[in-house]
Amino acid sequence: MLNALDRYSPHALAALRIVTALIFMEHGTQKLFGFPAVSERGMPALLSLSGVGGIMQFVGGILILFGVLTRPVAFLLSGQMAVAYWMFHAPDSLYPVLNGGDTPILYCFVFLLFVFTGPGAWSVDGLTAGRGTQRLA
């Protein structure tokens, strides 16, 4: 009976991709545009570490949202989140519940999942995969 759910896997993966991208983009819009609210640290300079992170979060989030270049973008964003955890959270404590690092850890591994699974259904990558190449199952 549970095997019957397998046919919905691409759609569930796409839902995870879309929701992850929308929430992830908020971190970028907060850093770049002060929306939905300016962080307690204020707006970072565009070419600072946080500013570049905001650009990656916003642009990478848009690409993940639409499923464009999903695997390479997800690889970069997974790395960004690993760096964010070790640079900004782990120095306070190694325990994510104490250092506020739950979110970057989860993003890191969700993006890493997309590196291996691809975007799922409803993606630009999926639409263009059939053009000139053989799609894998």
Image (cartoon, rainbow, N blue to C red):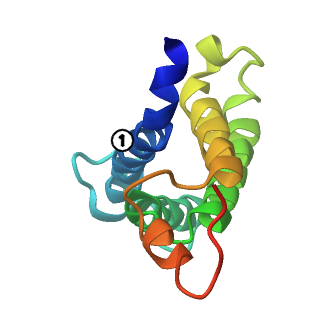
| Vertical position of residue 122 compared to residue 133: above or below | above
Which picture quadrant has residue 34?
Answer: bottom left
Q: Is residue 4 left or right of residue 137?
A: left
Location of residue 134 in the rendering, given as x and y in whole percent from the top left corner:
65, 75
Give me the residue at 60% from left, 88% from top: 132
Give me the residue at 55% from left, 67% from top: 52
Q: Is residue 60 left or right of residue 48?
A: left
Q: Secondary structure at mark 1?
A: helix
- Quadrant location of the C terminus? bottom right
Residue annotated with mark 1: 19
Label 1 amino acid? Val
Which picture quadrant has residue 104?
Answer: top right
Can the viewer see residue 127? yes
Location of residue 69 in the rendering, given as x and y in whole percent from the top left corner:
56, 71
Judged from this view, the residue extending furthest toward the left is 36
Q: Nearer the viewer, residue 81 or 122?
A: 122
Judged from this view, the residue extending furthest toward the bottom is 132
Location of residue 1 in the rendering, given as x and y in whole percent from the top left corner:
49, 11
